[in-house]
Amino acid sequence: MRKQIRVSERDGFNRRNFPCSTTLDFMPGEFTEDTPARMLDTEGEPRPVQVDALETWDDASVRTAEVSFPARLRAGGEEILAFEYGDGTPPPPPPPNPIKVRDRKDPIEVQQGPVIYQVRKWRFNFVENVIFDGRAFHGPGAPGPALLRKDGRILFPSGEVRIDVETRGPRTARLRVDGTYGGGYEFVAYLTFFSGVSWFRAEHEVVSGDVSQIATVVVENTFNLPDGPLVTAFGARQRSDGEGTSWAVVTDNTATVDVAAAGAWSRKGSVRYEVEANGRFRTLFPSLEKPGILYMHYLTTPPMDHHHTPAAAMATELECRVM
């Protein structure tokens, strides 16, 4: 059996193994977690694919599944892929640098080939460190995502957060984080990691407490870029779906960190970036109207041109529809 998926690129970027996902619906008994499945491109070549059940029927068969795969498109292009499943379907090829999650101790580690992301439960701050080819990109001691109240109080995540591994790879890994602040505030964060790329996506939402009293959400890191002086560049654009995006590039001309945000402006203000000479970096979200979405990309090389960075593409989504 087959289901066809149309993937479209609307934002003017070439995509090579760009993370893409969609949901598929099945009838009772049509698909189970043990059903063989693969993804084929327009020429019939198989691609890596990961299938994660989101909802099941009463008979435990899959009702809705998330399907994750790499997209390969030229700027403005389209491709039609076939999701093939059922008895006798050959297995899909493994992804390059498959995702591995090690969650038996703190910090949790998510590995993508040469890149290791460390996520701690105590003093949670999205990622505690990123180690790429043995190089640590984050310095110690940065606080977690902070709430700056209108009365001047600053609230940090308190105690230990709860981390649930929702998907474990090999194509995509997603961690759900539940935590609290003082003053009755609670938050949920999702961290998503992808095979084949050295960046991750973080989503943060305050789910309880008087959000009308919050002026800004501040995400702070200290980047380990010692071969300075640092060079920085900033940019912004509107996606094809109307969503505003912005980004910052920080490099010491040896290594580089790109940071990008979706939902970068609204009637309440715009996302701002602050960088200091010692590598301390802050992203400031001015609105809690919807979750804050942040992308962080790590390179062991200087950018070819720090004014034209993949950070801009990172914060754009491919259009993915079931036909």
Image (tube, rainbow, N blue to C red):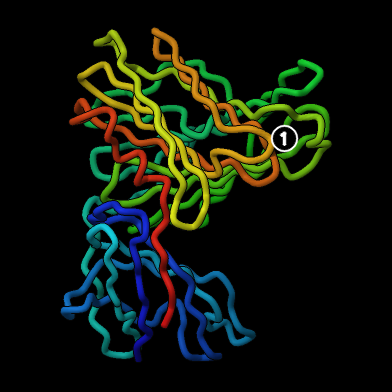
Instruction: Report the amino acid beneath label 1.
Output: Thr
| Along the line of sight, the residue nearer the viewer: 49 or 211 | 211
Q: Position of residue 50 (x, y in %)?
A: 36, 66
To which quarter of the image does residue 272 belong?
top right
- How many labels were placed on the picture? 1
| Along the line of sight, the residue nearer the viewer: 136 or 3 | 3
- Residue at 64% in and 32% down: 269
- Residue at 67% in and 36% down: 287
- Residue at 53% in and 43% down: 293
Left/right of residue 20 with respect to residue 188 in the rendered view:
left
**Residue that numbered label 1 is attached to:** 180
Q: Position of residue 111 (x, y in %)?
A: 33, 43
| Along the line of sight, the residue nearer the viewer: 226 or 247 | 247
Does residue 78 appear in this view?
A: yes
Query: Is residue 281 placed above or below 4 in the rendered structure?
Result: above
Q: Position of residue 154 (x, y in %)?
A: 71, 19
Q: Position of residue 291 (x, y in %)?
A: 62, 45
Q: How many C-alpha atoms fall within 10 Å of the one at disc 1: few (<14), some, or many (≥20)?
A: many
Q: Looking at the figure, which quarter contains the N terminus?
A: bottom left
Secondary structure beneath label 1: strand
- Residue at 57% in and 21% down: 143
Query: Is residue 156 placed above or below 113 in the rendered structure?
Result: above
| Along the line of sight, the residue nearer the viewer: 14 or 92 | 14
Does residue 163 appear in this view?
A: no
Q: Looking at the figure, which quarter contains the C terminus?
A: bottom left
